[in-house]
Amino acid sequence: MFFRELSQIITEGAGLNITVRSAGGKLTVSLFPKVNGLKDEAQNHLQPIVLTGNADELDEGFFTAVGQPIQKATGMLSGMKSFEESIVRVEAEKKEAQEQKRTVDKKAQERKTKYDDFMTRAEHQEKEGKNDNALYLLREARKIADDANIAKTDERIEQLKGKTLQKALF
């Protein structure tokens, strides 16, 4: 009966340290609620629940006296544990989001570098009079251009097409 009643007042995941001392025909029972894995040191500053009486008195009024205080303390400690776990989850999610942002930024930078390379090579090809090669490079640049550079690249392609057409006519 003792453990059945005890199991009803201790919340899930909580523990209860029980110390019993005998002195002068009386028993002193000290109960200290605890949650393992709780990082917050506040649980170490809780006052233990202490009852003193003879064996018959403790048998009769033990659970009446300790039930609500134990439930309150273990519930609070379990809440602290849940809070700590949620902080860990949030920090992990934040770290993952930052990593994803870095990956996206890195990919965008790589695309920009590749785009700039295509544009520079196209310009050199155009200066050397190799307009077909320059057009090819401009079209490749357009495939990876960001929204801000698409119009600029299209304009360069049309200009070069115009130059190529003029050379072909004359």
Image: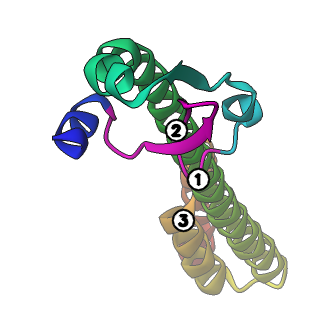
Question: Does 26 sit above or below residue 131?
Answer: above
Can residue 8 be spotted in the picture? yes
Q: Residue at x 15, y 41 (%)?
A: 1
**Type of residue at label 1?**
Gly
Callout 2: SS: helix
Decide which of tag 1 and tag 3 comes sooner along the chain.
1
* Coordinates of residue 102 in the picture (x, y in percent): 68, 57
State whether residue 66 is above or below residue 150.
Answer: above
Instruction: Name the residue located 63 percent from the left edge and 63 percent from the top edge.
Output: 103
Highlighted magenta segment, given as a residue range: 10-38
Q: Residue at x 61, y 78 (%)?
A: 137
Q: Amino acid at mark 2?
A: Lys
User: In this rendering, is residue 98 above or below 118?
Assistant: above
Q: Is residue 87 magenta?
A: no
Residue under label 1? 37
Quadrant housing residue 151: top right
Residue 36 on the magenta span:
yes
Q: Is residue 57 left or right of residue 17?
A: left
Identify the mark at residue 144; answer none if there is no mark.
Answer: 3
**Is disc 3 placed on a helix, strand or loop?**
helix
Q: Amino acid at mark 3?
A: Ile
